[in-house]
Amino acid sequence: MIPFLDLKAQYQTVGADIEAAVVAALRSCNYVLGQPVADFEAAFAAYCGAEHAVAVSSGTSALHLALLAAGVGPGDEVITVSATFVATAAAVVYCGATPVFVDVDPNTWTMDPGKIAAAITPRTKAILPVHLHGRLADMEAIAAIARRHRLVLIEDAAQAHGTERDGKRAGTFGAMGCFSFYPGKNLGACGEGGAIVTSDAKLAATLRCLRDWGQEGKYNHVRHGFNFRMDAVQGAALGVKLKHLDAWNAGRRRVAHAYQQGLAGGIRRPAPIGMDSACHVYAIRISDRADVQQLLGERGIATGIHYPVPVHLQPAYAGLGGKKGDLPVTEALANDWLSLPLYPEMSDADVATVIEAVNVTTVDKLAGAA
């Protein structure tokens, strides 16, 4: 069986170092925040090219706090995409604001800058693009729109650790960049974790206050805050793993490039892979997805779907008034996406096996459709 993701293979390469770092953190008996988290924050900020990194309990917490720090609240609107994990929109709702969804570009599958202007109203406070599957959105164009309309720009970089364009890394194009360290991410913790990066010292101070019960000094609660602190064990593990991130991303790109070159011509692929993609997910577009997924499973190849129902069509968000046909590109992608196995430890033989199986399975389907 070729798994969709193999965290055990990763652990074989870094497990001893993680265990040593975690044991040291446990022996310190300082289990919340503390030196391991502070050290990781400094290293991650430097890695991203930001002045500050604020470690929190999850990627969702990162989005929530970034929006609050930007002043987003009841009555405000935040322009974002529906082609994402639900946490992107949930964080907006947590602030009492309303997510306003725009469609994605049919080639990059990220926010279409050409759709933003029509979505701006007097209530718009921020733009929240998503670097879907690890691919950097068109941040230059989006940032220009944000500046022109004096809107706060916050990046959902939960899947884009190390993604860069012209030497500038994801998370640093806007006021803040939000990351998730869920275990399956390119940089994953040994549990939950997240971070916000920023080069604005005032925002960083606000974020640190918000994550720790709104405190400025012990028992001095200056604002309504949250218990969104990162624990020392996660900081220790992430500090070890960060040193390997570039190599892991290179391994992911190796697999993605092989897929790009080896898959049959009729299979719809992502846009070309470069440094502007961390290759968190490699998804193809295929009709009769359920049948193809079943046939691949019978051949011993695990696959995934990210994400089969867009946020604007989720029952929990029906109150926003979204309906089928509102976002045609997003909806078409959701119907067709099928994610192939992708992790840096994949052998060339396993990659070749996946390519062969996908080609045989999908070519038969394509021939039948013709």
Image: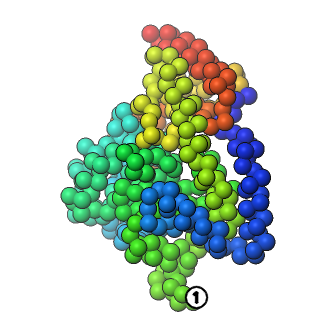
Quarter that holds the C terminus: top left
Label 1 element class? loop
Left or right of residue 123, residue 244 in this image: right
Q: Look at 68% across and 58% down and name the residue there.
A: 237
Residue 26 at x, y percent in the picture: 77, 69
Residue 218 at x, y percent in the picture: 58, 88
Left or right of residue 12, residue 285 in this image: left
Q: Look at 36% across and 33% down and name the residue there.
A: 107
Choose between 81 and 138: the one closer to the eye.
Answer: 138
Choose between 20 and 237: the one closer to the eye.
Answer: 20
Q: Look at 66% across and 39% down and name the residue there.
A: 5
Q: Is residue 114 visible?
A: yes
Choose between 230 and 23: the one closer to the eye.
Answer: 23
Q: Which residue is mark 1?
A: 218
Q: Is residue 130 visible?
A: no
Residue 51 at x, y percent in the picture: 44, 66
- Up the image or down, 153 lies above or below 35; here it is above
Q: Look at 20% across and 58% down and name the residue there.
A: 148
Choose between 151 and 88: the one closer to the eye.
Answer: 151
